Amino acid sequence: MIDSTVIKKKMIVCDLDGTLTESKLGVTREMSENIKKLVKYLPLAVIGGGTYKQFTEQFAAGIGTEEKTLSRIYLFPTCATRFYKYSVNTWKEIYAETLTEEEKKKIVNAINTALNMTNIKPTQLFGDIIEDRGTQITYSGLGQKAPIELKIVWDKTLEKRQKIKRILETLIPEFEITIGGTTSIDITRKGIDKAYGIRKICEYFNYEIKDLLFFGDAIFEGGNDYPVKSIGVDSIKVENYKETMAYFNKIIEIFEKKAKT
């Protein structure tokens, strides 16, 4: 799936959880070194459902502190409702699509109604199941702090979240509702999803859709990575961060080979 045509790309775009890291876990040392090599050739934009704090602690902190590396990385947390770039030793916010208190209340009420209607209530919870992320409200089936081994098996077929999502779509049709990660449903304003983030990237850097290559683990209808593919971005579905790293290694190898010729 990766061949010499990758030379023509201008940026790699990636989901975070399940693509660059395991859910809610930090970037591995091996992946960090991999990314440092990758961004010498192609800048990297990271789009995910997590908060800005999660992005910096889970991902950016593991990449190191070198400005020449971090300045080639762009963060789009909470499904691209925010955009941060690194400059002069800090991450600077470029935009934020913040929900109003009224919008947040309506979303939270809808989630609670949907949960009551479906009776999807685990016997044990690990932290809050509804999180206000400012620009996004996120539902997590087992709670925000659930162990990864439990999260992986809780809704493997997506049946639970699809059921909740269908009800939410009738209750709050004016919002964007997508399935993300292993246990999450992300809710933002209508039209604000990862495709929105792609359009913002193209606008900010003066790129075209064909200039980007996307990696994600939720590239399926209803998944929070699917909007990227739906607008025509060349996309590769991965099962985990190790598979992403294998693709990165292939890209690095192609660029290194070209540099030697």
Image (spheres, rainbow, N blue to C red):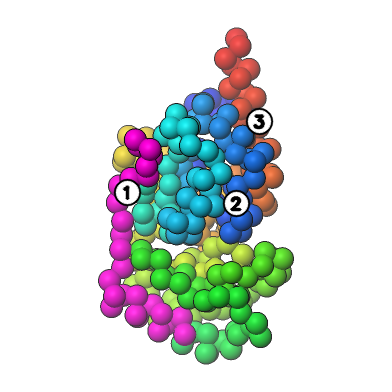
Residue 13 position, x and y percent, is 49, 42
Q: Disc 1 designates what residue?
A: 93
CA–CA distance in space, label 2 to label 3: 23 Å
CA–CA distance in space, label 2 to label 1: 22 Å
Residue segment shown in magenta: 85-112
**Residue situated furthest top in the rendering:** 261
Q: Disc 3 designates what residue?
A: 250
* Residue drawn at the location 64% of the way across and 45% of the way down: 28
The amino acid type of the residue labelled 1 equals Glu
The amino acid type of the residue labelled 3 equals Lys
Q: Residues within 10 Å of mark 1 (few under 14, many from 20)?
A: some
- The secondary element bearing badge 1 is classed as strand
The stretch drawn in magenta includes residue 86: yes
* Residue drawn at the location 51% of the way across and 26% of the way down: 40
Q: Are marks 2 and 1 in contact (CB under 8 Å)?
A: no
Left-right relation of 180 to 151? left
Q: Residues within 10 Å of mark 2 (few under 14, many from 20)?
A: many
Name which of mark 2 and mark 3 comes first in the sequence: 2
Residue 22 position, x and y percent, is 64, 54
Q: In which quadrant of the rendered view does residue 223 lie?
A: bottom right
- The secondary element bearing badge 3 is classed as helix
Q: Are marks 2 and 3 in contact (CB under 8 Å)?
A: no
Vertical side of 195 occupied by 88: above or below: above
Vertical side of 135 occupied by 208: above or below: above
Left-right relation of 190 to 152? left
Q: Quadrant of the C terminus?
A: top right
Q: In which quadrant of the rendered view does residue 120 lie?
A: bottom right
Q: In which quadrant of the rendered view does residue 159 lie?
A: bottom right
Q: Disc 2 designates what residue?
A: 26
Q: Is residue 156 visible?
A: no
* Residue drawn at the location 72% of the way across and 66% of the way down: 149
